[in-house]
Image: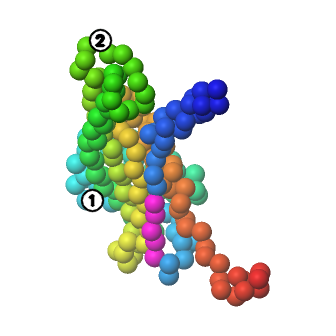
Amino acid sequence: MKTFKFLPLLLLFIVSSCDTVRVYSDYDKSVDFTQYKTFAFMKSGIDKVEISDLDKKRILNAIDQQLQAKGLTKSETPDLLVNIFTKSREEISVNQFNAGYGYGWGWGWNPYMYGGQTYVSSSTEGTLYIDLIDAKKKELIWQGEGTGTLSKDMAEKDAIVNDIVTQILAQYPPAKPEKKENKEKKK
């Protein structure tokens, strides 16, 4: 009986884990991120991204909203240049469901004697990189990366892009690392 109560929880975990966004970031530790107040998009880099113009627009709008929510403003003479690039790959899932005698979840009767069915499904996993570049030095100072499952449904695309961009930029600006002196005092 306990197994049947646990099964729905396990299925919920499996389904929710398929829709998660994995996010990472890296940055130059010598940079004081408080100095950056304005931004602009780096048109020359964004034009090279090989996705539809509509998807570019979705991504740039989401980045614009998130950076403005963090207190940065768009400017013709920016402190930061924002660039993006993307990668995608197709994922194929093969599931076999067997019924009949033999190895597996248990014994059963199979009138067809061929042992089961195979289901194949595919999805596209996309990765979005957001680069923040010091406009004066022309140096990369922060990079965020988010990976998630993509959709062709327009309403889902908007939600997915907003979710990925929000989670990536949640890591900007990076948290200041504690100094060694503070750690020693706490011990």
Residue at position x 54%, y 72% in the image: 33
Instruction: Name the image quarter holding the N terminus.
Output: top right
Depth check: 143 or 120 in front? 120
Whether residue 152 can be seen here: no
Left or right of 166 on screen, residue 9: right
Residue at position x 43%, y 28% in the image: 106
Left or right of 129 on screen, residue 113: left
Determine which residue is flagged by label 1.
Answer: 45
Residue 92 in the image: x percent, y percent?
Answer: 27, 38
Depth check: 86 or 1 in front? 1
In this rendering, is residue 95 above or below 25?
above
Depth check: 171 or 93 in front? 93
Q: Are marks 1 and 2 in contact (CB under 8 Å)?
A: no
| Res 77 quadrant in image | bottom left
Queried whether the magenta region covers residue 134, the answer comes back as no
Residue at position x 52%, y 69% in the image: 36
Residue at position x 49%, y 63% in the image: 38
Left or right of 45 on screen, residue 7: right
Residue 45 in the image: x percent, y percent?
Answer: 27, 59
Q: Earlier in the sequence, mark 1 or mark 2?
A: 1
Write the start and end of the magenta stretch as one range.
24-28
Depth check: 45 or 98 in front? 98
Whether residue 136 can be seen here: yes
Dot 1: element = helix
Amino acid carrying label 1: it is: Gly
Crowd band around label 1 with a 10 angstrom C-alpha radius: few (<14), some (14–19), many (20+): few
Determine which residue is flagged by label 2.
Answer: 111
Q: Main secondary structure of the magenta part?
A: strand
In this rendering, is residue 178 above or below 146?
below
Residue, far right: 186
Instruction: Name the image quarter holding the C terminus.
Output: bottom right
Crowd band around label 2 with a 10 angstrom C-alpha radius: few (<14), some (14–19), many (20+): few
